[in-house]
Each structure stands twice: as structure tokens, then as C-alpha cells.
Amino acid sequence: MTLDTPRHLLLVSGKGTYPLLLAQSARKRGVERITALAFRGETRREITRHVDDVIWLRLGQLADLLEAAGRTGAKHAVMAGQLTPTALFTARLDSAALAMLKGLERRNAHTIFAAVADSLSKCGVDLLPANVFMESNVPEPGVLGSRHPSKTETNDISLGLNVAKVTSDLDIGQTVVVRQGTILAVEAFEGTNQTIKRAGALAGPGIVVVKVAKPSHDMRFDIPVIGMHTVRVLRSVRASVLAIEARRTLLLDKDDVIRAADSMGLSLVAMTTLDAKT
């Protein structure tokens, strides 16, 4: 175990495979004990096979989360996996959560998770970057699969990147969908996959999907993540390109995603801000 590797890691676990993969990677990197804070109806039950302890919580119960985090004795935590966006409106919030939200001028994933991170810090728990232990899943710039984008698609990527950098900086959304120079959809509260479906319904096959991190993104939470579920959504609408931000996007099941992209003729590109055209 290196000096930078915590002995005991607190894993705040949301939906999907991300928490499972992170737990596996953390174990390989020498983390001796992993305690998961999991959410009923959100976190996969199989998390129990990848960690030492699981504490099941309900969404919206911030006081319970902070009490549980302090009780574990862990000094380092990672947030992994999304939570259902509409939970902000449907979950039963305790007084601590209500007080936290009341103090926020804007209520979006970034501001809410930042407030939770501050609360954890007051409990003596330091929140680590969300891509910690997953560096091999963060792609460098370039075409990741076998198909390069066409000239028209490259122009659409540049347009989408310019727009997505603005919308993400305004905390509106990380994803923009383009086709032949037309902005079809901008992600709002519904999330990336629903944005892709909405754009596909509008324009049919051949859409270009661009996903970025906000310019001042706090990499401890809500980082851009792409996995097989999104690839299946892209297949269902017959998208032609997925462009993600290099060095700032987490590509889960990386090899499987690249193989799937190649099999469906999807151009998978890791871009930088230099790819934007003014």
C-alpha cells in the first residue's frame, strides 16, 4: 500500500456499475477496508460482494448519512454513481437536508454534492476525486475506436463542444446533441440518456452527442461518466458519434464500450477544448 492509499475507504454508492468497479479497483490498489453507504432503491444489491460493510440509507436523510459516515471511522470517501434526478422532488427530506437546500442559491447536482462534501468534511471525512483508483478509465485525446468522424461530424463536435462548455458552466447540463449544424437537445435535469433519447426522437439516425465537464468542475463529484447503458441508448437511436472530454471523463467498462462502439459503427472520440472552433 502506498502512502497515498487510505487503509479504510468510505464509498458513497449511487446507481449502476461505477461503485462496484471503483471498489474492485480500490482493493487492487491496496485499500484494506471499504465501507459502502448505499441507498435503498438506488444502489445495486451486489455492492455487498465488493465491500466489507454496507450501511443502507434512504435518500434525503442527510443526518443519517453524516452519522453513519462518522461512525465508520473512515477519514477518506469517494462518491460514485448517479442518483435518480427526480429524487430531489420525491424523496422525503429530513431537517438537515432541508436546511442544506435552503442555504443553496441554485439547486443542481454540483451545488448539492458540494454541500454534502462540506458536511462530510465537518465530520472529519475528506472527499477524494471521483476518478481516484480509476485512472486507466480516463481516456487521453484521440479516436478511441476504429471509426473516425467525418468532416461534417467533426464540425458538429466542435459546435457541440462550444455550446456544452457554456451550458455546463451555467450548471444547466453536460451534454449537447447536434446534427448537421443544428442543436437538437441540451441536457437539463433529466440526465444524459434521456437527452439522447429526446434528440433521437427529433432527428432520427446520425446524431452527434457531446459530453463535457464544466470548466471549473470539482472532480470530487458529478464527473462525466459513460458506460454500457449509455452505449445501448446510443444504439437505440442509431447515433453516429459520441464525443467525450479527454482526461476529464470516466469511461466505465472501457474495453467493452469501445468494442460495442465499433460493432455499431459509432465514432467514439476523446476531445479537448482545442477541438472547439471559434
Image (spheres, rainbow, N blue to C red):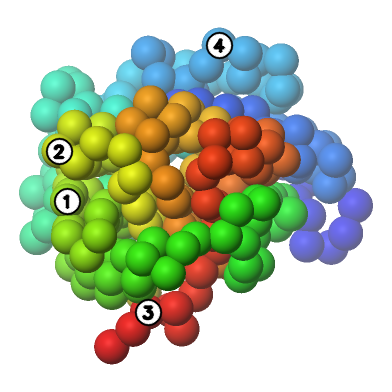
Confirm or deny contact between disc 2 and disc 1 (CB under 8 A): yes
Inspect the image, locate mark 4, and give the three-letter code of the amino acid beneath it. Answer: Arg
Inspect the image, locate mark 3, and give the three-letter code of the amino acid beneath it. Answer: Ala
Q: Residues within 10 Å of mark 2 (few under 14, many from 20)?
A: few
**Regarding mark 1 in the picture, which secondary structure is present there?**
strand
Which residue does the image show at 38% across and 56% down from the upper left?
211
Q: Nearer the viewer, residue 167 or 179?
A: 179
Q: In the picture shown, does residue 45 fall above or below 187?
A: above
Inspect the image, locate mark 1, and give the three-letter code of the amino acid beneath it. Answer: Leu
Which residue does the image show at 68% across and 37% down from the upper left?
259
For marks 2 and 4, give the one nearer the viewer. 2
Q: Residues within 10 Å of mark 4 (few under 14, many from 20)?
A: few
Whichever of labels 2 and 1 marks the residue nearer the N terminus, that label is 1
Percent from the top left, x then y, of residue 55? 53, 20
Q: Nearer the viewer, residue 203 or 66?
A: 203
The Cα atoms of the two marked residues, 3 and 2, are separated by 25 Å
Residue with the mark numbered 1: 184
Residue with the mark numbered 3: 276
Residue with the mark numbered 2: 202
Q: Residues within 10 Å of mark 1 (few under 14, many from 20)?
A: many
Whichever of labels 3 and 1 marks the residue nearer the N terminus, that label is 1
The Cα atoms of the two marked residues, 2 and 1, are separated by 7 Å
Residue with the mark numbered 4: 45
For marks 3 and 2, give the one nearer the viewer. 2
Please indicate whether residue 14 sits to the left or right of residue 247 in the image: left
